[in-house]
Image: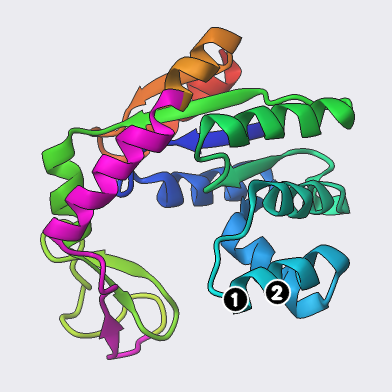
């Protein structure tokens, strides 16, 4: 089962990806994680990526696509994977299609999680996490059970991302609609797109995603 979770920042892709990982035993492939791993391992493509990043430039689609391709060849991806953060543009989507086709593979589903903009801004602006284990909380929707103490690890240290604020989030949304939202039409035309209501409670969204995968 090869999937892409598509949606704006704050749509809940990370939460639902974790549900899919636990249920289906397939890895979540994050481009950021893969880039860091390739650089740390000193692979040929990792060295190329490091040189670009050290120069303060953006890593090209060609380099990212090669890193994704090499990651997909690893044994834990044999039964499928979830692509996270890639593709983000139509050019990248074409690259992914060509790369998978060369391996005799294809995407099974692209799940779009649709959430109203005002809700996305509220979700992200109120988000914070445990500084020790990374468990995510929210000022209104998910406070720790004991105030000031992480439910998962008991740490009392929390942090907020500098870009988790309303103004920055609106900028991120504009970039999403300009660069990434065209992928909705792209995958609709290919017949792989399914849209779920990301406004529903987490368990209901998970059920809708499972139904979309099976359907």
Residue 104 horizontal/vertical position (percent): 88, 25
Name the side, left or right, on which 11 lies relative to 214: left
In the rendered structure, find residue 130 and report the number of the disc placed on it: none
Can residue 172 be found in the magenta stretch?
yes
Marks 2 and 1, how far apart at CA: 6 Å
Q: Is residue 69 visible?
A: yes
Residue placed furthest toward the bottom: 156
For the residue pair 112 and 155, the one nearer the viewer reads as: 112
Residue range highlighted in magenta: 154-182
* Colour treatment of the image: rainbow
76, 170: nearer the viewer: 170
Tell me residue 196's x, y (percent): 37, 24
Do the residues under discs 2 and 1 have CB atoms within 8 angstroms?
yes
The answer to whether residue 1 is seen in the rendering is no
- Is the residue 133 above or below the residue 213 in the image? below
The image quadrant where one finds the C terminus is top right
Residue in the image at 45% along x and 16% along y: 185
Asked which quadrant contains residue 173, the reply is top left
The image's mark for residue 55 is 1
């Amino acid at each position: 089962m090869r999937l892409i979770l598509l949606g704006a920042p704050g749509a809940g892709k990370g939460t639902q990806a974790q549900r899919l990982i636990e249920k289906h035993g397939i890895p979540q492939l994050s481009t950021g994680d893969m880039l860091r791993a390739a650089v740390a391992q000193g692979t040929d493509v990792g060295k190329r990526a490091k040189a670009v990043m050290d120069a303060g430039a953006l890593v090209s689609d060609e380099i990212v696509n090669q890193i994704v391709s090499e990651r997909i060849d690893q044994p834990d991806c044999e039964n499928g994977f979830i692509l996270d953060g890639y593709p983000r543009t139509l050019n990248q989507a074409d690259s992914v299609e060509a790369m998978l086709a060369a391996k005799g593979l294809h995407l099974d589903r692209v799940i779009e999680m649709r959430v109203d903009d005002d809700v996305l801004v509220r979700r992200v602006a109120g988000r914070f996490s445990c500084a020790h284990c990374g468990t995510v909380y929210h000022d209104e929707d998910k406070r720790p059970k004991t105030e000031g103490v992480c439910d998962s690890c008991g740490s009392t240290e929390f942090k907020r991302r500098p870009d988790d604020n309303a103004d920055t989030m609106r900028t991120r949304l504009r970039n999403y609609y300009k660069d990434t939202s065209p992928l909705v039409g792209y995958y609709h035309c290919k017949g792989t797109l399914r849209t779920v209501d990301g406004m529903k409670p987490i368990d209901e969204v998970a059920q809708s995603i499972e139904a979309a995968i099976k359907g």
